[in-house]
Amino acid sequence: MKNIVIDDLHFELMIDYDQIQKRIRLIGIDINLRYEHKHPVFIGVLNGCFMFMADLMKQVHIPCEMSFVKLASYSGTEQGKVSELLGVGMDLTDRHVVIVEDIVDTGNSLVHTIEALERLNVASISVATLLMKPSCLLYTFDNIMYVGFEIEKEFVVGYGLDYNGQCRNLQHIYKQFDPQLIEKNN
Ligand SMILES: O=P(O)(O)OC[C@H]1O[C@H](OP(=O)(O)OP(=O)(O)O)[C@H](O)[C@@H]1O
Ligand SMILES: Nc1nc2[nH]cnc2c(=O)[nH]1
């Protein structure tokens, strides 16, 4: 299935499942070495992370724990906007945490997730993201340790990522294209 149409948008195959799995195996090897004696906690940020988290955890063979969170932001306090992590469900004090994201685009979500975890007095925070759009980043992060693939400023779906709530179930990653541009060039 090379091209797909979801509602009003057209998508073409960008990264296939085998490529994703190869990259995840390499990330797993590094995590197994780096965190061997640290008993890390992997925190998946829902919804998009679920496929990456599942496949990544199959490559992690050291003692570890995991949890899934949702990010809720609210404003109106004296400090302005505050983000809360819903669903942590465990004490993270002094724990080495690896945030697992499907994509870092502007970095807004990641900033809020990191800030919320810092308030929980964790020992360390690093980030594993399957995709990153370096040209879209609005912040500098010094703790993004694992990036599966760097991509251009393009809208992608599949492998956990949605468009209008659809496509999360697709095995491969697809990028949006404009069919009218292709017609014009032919
Ligand atoms: O770097 P940013 O510009 O913040 O974009 C990245 C975020 O966007 C997506 O989440 P979304 O809020 O769409 O929720 P979802 O995971 O439920 O799809 C994705 O899962 C990241 O968390
Ligand atoms: N589905 C999807 N969600 C995103 N959130 C931030 N960037 C993206 C993207 O390219 N695709």
Image: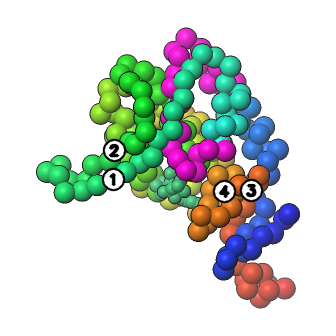
Q: Provide the residue span drawn in magenta.
A: 29-51
| Label 4 within 8 A of ligand 1 by Cβ | yes
Residue visible at 54% across and 29% down? Answer: 66
Q: Is residue 137 magenta?
A: no
Tags 2 and 1 touching, CB below 8 Å: yes
Q: Which residue is mark 1?
A: 73
Q: Nearer the viewer, residue 154 or 38?
A: 38
Identified by mark 1, the residue type is: Ser
Q: Which mark is residue 168?
A: 4
Precedes in sequence: disc 2 or disc 1: 1
Q: Nearer the viewer, residue 181 or 29?
A: 29
Q: Residue at x 34, y 40 (%)?
A: 115
Q: Amino acid at mark 3?
A: Leu
Q: Residues within 10 Å of mark 2 (few under 14, many from 20)?
A: some
Rendered image coloring scheme = rainbow
Is label 3 in contact with label 4 (beta carbons under 8 Å)?
yes
Q: Which mark is residue 170?
A: 3
Q: Earlier in the sequence, mark 2 or mark 4?
A: 2
Q: Which residue is mark 2?
A: 84
* Cα separation between marks 1 and 3: 29 Å
At x 43%, y 51%, the residue is: 109
- Secondary structure of the residue carrying tag 2 is strand
Q: Earlier in the sequence, mark 1 or mark 3?
A: 1
Q: How would you rate the neighbour count of disc 3 (Cα within 10 Å): few for under 14, some for 14-19, many for 20 or more? A: some
Q: CA distance from mark 3 to mark 4?
A: 6 Å
